Amino acid sequence: MEPLVSIILPAYNAENTISTIIRSTINQTYKNYEIIIVDDGSQDQTAQIIESFGDSRIILIKNKINMKLARSLNVAIEAARGDYIARCDADDINMPDRLELLINFLESNPDVDVVGSDLYIIDKNGTILGKYIIPDCDNNILMNRLNPESPVFHPTIMARAAWMKKFKYREEYSRAQDRELFFRAYHQTKFANVHLPLYAYYDPEVINIRKLALSLWFNFKMRWDNRKECTMPINWLLSFPLLAGGRFIYYLITALLGHNLFWKHMTPVNTSDSRVMKDQQWIYYCRNY
């Protein structure tokens, strides 16, 4: 029998987008899965919309109060019954073969713990703006950088359930939970990426400076909290505020110019390419069904 996949999906006040991500998930080419949706104390119609699908593969967990992202993810991980756990967010879209291709990769590469993929960047209308290609990088190289890049793009990942249940998310992190998890697990984890856009990430087009500032703070906290486990030199820690300051200025200029966060990193797509055309049609279908 095919391995069971648990898809974990946190949602908060997501009534405008939750139907789209569910529709893109229940129509996957791979069929043996469960969708664990944690409604994190929403005050809108999120829960009612989820229940309206009436799909036995959807497991809805309702937090009585808003417990934030990290706790909601851990609640879903604790409830997961699958051999693999896949992430997605409430305002994004899974490409129809995402689960199939990631499972095939993990089944064929038993030494890999976590696999991610490239992704499309889409606007509020679902139009593909470009493609974000995750660079491959050896774990040792990552750890020896002053500002290590994330080895995978968080919402695209599928991990072995044993790995996810071992590490989980640190709930005191209100931002940068993903980077902290990957950073903490570097020495015990093999990451990989499938270089196909298997996920569509919604770019809100408006940069929230406050959230970005919080992310930079938690990126520093991540390094401090894990300094012993990761044998991080003290000069790296002391240098990070300067690096963070430069990045904050970059974000501020980006916002003033009206660009999105991915504008320097997006690769243009060939709109006449058969896969891009098919994926664009899929995105429109999921959004406008």
Image (cartoon, helix red, strand yellow):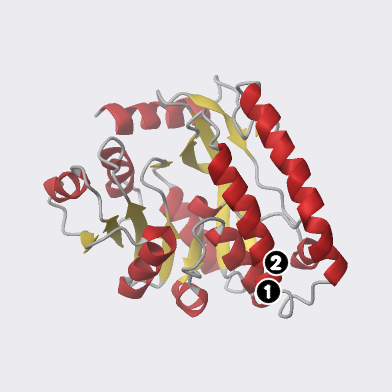
Name the residue type under label 1.
Asn
Which residue position is annotated with label 2? 223
The image position of residue 121, as x and y in percent, is: 53, 33
Q: Residue at x 47, y 61 (%)?
A: 103
- Residue 22 x, y percent position in the rendering: 28, 46
Q: Amino acid at mark 2?
A: Arg
Residue 166 seen in this snapshot: yes
Question: Where's residue 259, x and y in %?
Answer: 62, 25
- Quarter of the rendering containing residue 7: bottom left
**Image check: 55 left or right of 116?**
left
Task: Describe residue 230's horizontal placement relative to residue 35 as left or right.
Answer: right
Label 2 Cα neighbours within 10 Å, binned few <14 / some 14-19 / many ≥20: many
Which residue is more in the foreground, 223 or 82? 223
Towards the viewer: 224 or 76: 224
Check whether the beta carbons of the residues at disc 2 and disc 1 lie within 8 A of each other: yes
From the viewer's perspective, tell me whether residue 30 is left or right of residue 160.
left
Q: Position of residue 57 (x, y in %)?
A: 21, 59
Mark-to-mark CA distance, 2 and 1: 5 Å
Depth check: give the residue in front, 41 or 99: 41
Label 1: how many Cα within 10 Å (few below 14, some 14–19, many 20+): some
Question: Label 1 belongs to which residue?
Answer: 226
